[in-house]
Image: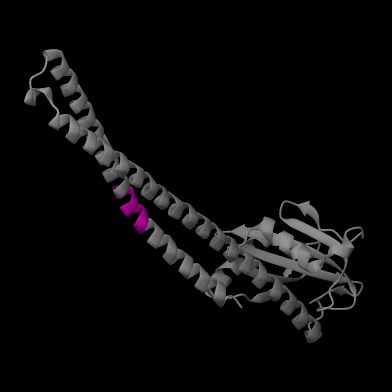
């Protein structure tokens, strides 16, 4: 209950800072078992699944030569808690560390908390070691920025995928209309020929006249149907063009947001 209250209060403070402000805080939090120093940061738009994957990749960088090596692995302790042992973070300390992580999902963001334990205890418990605390904060902030950037990139990818589909649909209507217009031209030509050779305008049997009239009505019905479909497609295109413009504006805004992440 105390932990939940801590996160609620922390969220209220961080929310006032603005969504794009990535700032690491140090607080006492029981991520492992007892209350220890934890580095906490708000990451807008991120989700726990992607966040923990990016976190593990940063803690344990892998390359082609690591395929058959036994490297430290992130383990899930609870629905919102993970730990990993035996990692060395050069940017923080030469010591081997155990890292305990908790992720709390909030609206449109997560609260990411991590505790770093060495043989000398948890980083941050000794406030006099300001250099170590600063390096750890900087390391976590670089991670948070990357996680935020990836979340925004995912948003951008989704928008661009939607835009591509809209543009394909728009092109599809254009292609459909070209076919319909060709058919309409052909039907109109047939209709003109039928009218010109209508038995009503020249001596002919009654049976032939009725057959020609039926054919004329059939062609007129087809002409009306095709013209109606063209109008329907054009209306859909007009609506889609507005949606495409709106989507393009959204993409522009997200690209601008992506550039501002730092």
Q: In this rendering, would 82 be left or right of 262?
A: right
Q: Image height check: is 113 above or below 229?
A: below
Q: In this rendering, would 15 be left or right of 185?
A: right
* Nearer to the camera, 170 or 152: 170
> Residue 179's quadrant in the figure?
top left
Which stretch appears magenta? Answer: 235-242
Instruction: Indicate how the structure is coloured in the image.
Output: one colour
> Residue 47's quadrant in the figure?
bottom right
Question: Magenta: predominant secondary structure element?
Answer: helix
Residue under the image location 78 percent in, 63 percent down: 56
Q: Image height check: is 257 above or below 238?
A: below
Residue 198 screen position, x and y as percent: 13, 26
* Nearer to the camera, 218 or 115: 218
Residue under the image location 72 percent in, 63 percent down: 54
* Nearer to the camera, 173 or 94: 173
Q: In this rendering, would 156 be left or right of 26?
A: left
Outermost residue toward the front in this view: 203
Residue 18 screen position, x and y as percent: 52, 74
Residue 224 screen position, x and y as percent: 22, 36
Residue 26 seen in the current view:
no
The quarter in which the C terminus is drawn is bottom right
Q: In this rendering, would 80 be left or right of 205?
A: right
The quarter in which the N terminus is drawn is bottom right
Residue 115 seen in the current view:
yes
Residue 99 counted in the magenta span: no
């Amino acid at each position: 209950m105390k932990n939940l209250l801590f996160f609620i209060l922390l969220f209220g403070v961080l929310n006032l800072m603005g969504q794009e402000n990535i700032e690491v805080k140090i607080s006492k939090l029981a991520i492992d078992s007892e209350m220890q120093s934890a580095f906490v940061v708000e990451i807008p738009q991120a989700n726990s699944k992607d966040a923990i994957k990016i976190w593990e990749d940063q803690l344990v960088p892998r390359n082609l030569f690591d395929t058959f090596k036994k490297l430290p692995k992130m383990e899930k302790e609870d629905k919102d808690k993970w730990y990993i042992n035996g990692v060395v973070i050069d940017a923080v300390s030469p010591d081997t560390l155990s890292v305990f992580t908790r992720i709390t999902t909030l609206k449109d963001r997560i609260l990411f908390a991590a505790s770093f334990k060495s043989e000398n205890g948890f980083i941050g418990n000794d406030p006099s070691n300001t250099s170590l605390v600063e390096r750890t904060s900087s390391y976590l902030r670089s991670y948070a920025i990357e996680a935020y950037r990836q979340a925004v990139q995912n948003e951008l990818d989704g928008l661009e995928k939607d835009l591509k589909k809209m543009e394909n649909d728009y092109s599809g209507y254009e292609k459909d209309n070209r076919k319909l217009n060709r058919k309409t031209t052909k039907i109109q030509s047939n209709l003109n020929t039928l009218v010109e050779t209508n038995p009503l305008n020249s001596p002919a049997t009654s049976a032939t006249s009725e057959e020609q009239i039926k054919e004329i009505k059939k062609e007129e019905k087809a002409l009306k149907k095709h013209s109606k479909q063209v109008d329907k497609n054009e209306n859909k295109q007009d609506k889609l063009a507005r949606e495409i413009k709106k989507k393009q504006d959204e993409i522009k805004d997200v690209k601008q947001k992506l550039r501002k992440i730092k």
